Amino acid sequence: MALVIYTFLSAVRTFVMPRSSNVMLTRIVFRATNLAFRFRLRHVTTYEDRDRVMALYAPLALLVLPAVWAAIILLGYMFMYWAIEPRPLYDVFSLSGSSLLTLGFTKSEGFLSLLFEFSEAVFGLTMIALLIAYLPTMYSAFSRRESMVAMLEVRAGAPPSPYELLTRAQRIRGLDALTELWVQWEVWFVEVEQSHTSLAALIFFRSPQPNVSWITAAGVILDTASILASTVDVPNNPQAQLMIRAGYIALRRIADYFSMEYNSNPTPDDFISISQAEYDALYDQLAAAGLPLKPDREATWRAFRGWRVNYDHVLLGLAALTMAPYAQWVSDRSLPHRRRLLFNKGKEHQRINDSGMS
């Protein structure tokens, strides 16, 4: 009975409860499925092949989850039927399976056993109802998330970058028109926080296009707003700053679900993954494109660093967790991309050494 009650509460906390809940059974199923997929990825060398394999990870894990719930409930009721009347294993398995799946080909005598059969049938129907009811809810949240990601590709290219977003905005409508974008993305971050903490499987749903991702889109939009607030010589835009705050709060809440460590109260002097040389290179590109920039480059670097430090660590952690595609200042410095870069550098050094020896 403890197995049955725990499994049912796990299903409720995973799908029904409208708040973040880190359920051990759900976590075990997703981790076991992830291990199987990582085993499949051992000999995959290109990102395109990796993305093609991992696209099945979240949908398959979601389908495995109800099967695991049903198997544990079936096992729990097998023990309960056996406790009422010890009988061969095949008989209690047949009785439990017949009741859970509402097949009705096996039944037993006695009021208590009949009560267990009815309750098991209710649990079986409830598991099916949860799957039918909440899969459309998840795909609806996924569709809303991806519509904004697709719109960003129009404005910032694929893979997206802050440079493309800022220069295209200036050419087409002017930088003042970005205020509308900040409002839309503030709402997007709030919705993502709510959906991706209550239905955490959404984090691993990959975008329809392999070269874009919700986490890289989030990083690019946050970096663009941070550059606008720190570097571009335009009037102060409070909406951009509100959007940045909504963004790093959302990413932190999602990171909390996976127990990622980060500094919740960072200072502008804390380390970030972007070097000043990388920032200076972008500064020069924006200046060459004709954007009005603040003249004190050292002050703008410190200001940008003060914004980026709020989301730098959780952004890279989530990019690594989701195996995100390449995007400037996001997944290009997350762990899988660092490993690939070191591997490619090692091969290049080996090629040079071999050619030198020959």
Image: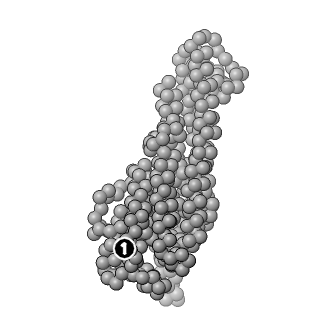
**How many numbered callouts?**
1
Return the residue found at the far right. 105
Residue 256: x %, y % from top left? 40, 51
Q: Is residue 97 left or right of residue 4?
A: right
Residue drawn at x 56%, y 77% as measured from the top left? 172
Residue drawn at x 39%, y 56% as measured from the top left? 249
| Observer able to see residue 199 | yes
In the figure, residue 243 lies in which quadrant? bottom left
Most foreground residue, 344 or 52: 52
Q: Is residue 216 left or right of residue 313?
A: right
Q: Residues within 10 Å of mark 1 (few under 14, many from 20)?
A: many
Above or below, 168 relative to 129: below
Residue 1: x %, y % from top left? 50, 24
Mark 1 residue type:
Ser
| Observer able to see residue 47 | no
| Rendered image coloring scheme | one colour
Residue drawn at x 47%, y 26% as measured from the top left? 2
Residue drawn at x 59%, y 41% as measured from the top left? 134
Above or below, 150 relative to 197: below
Above or below, 89 relative to 341: above
Most foreground residue, 308 or 64: 308
Residue 19: x %, y % from top left? 45, 42
Residue 334: x %, y % from top left? 45, 66
Residue identified by numbered label 1: 230
In the figure, residue 240 lies in which quadrant? bottom left
Q: Secondary structure at mark 1?
A: helix
Most foreground residue, 238 or 127: 238
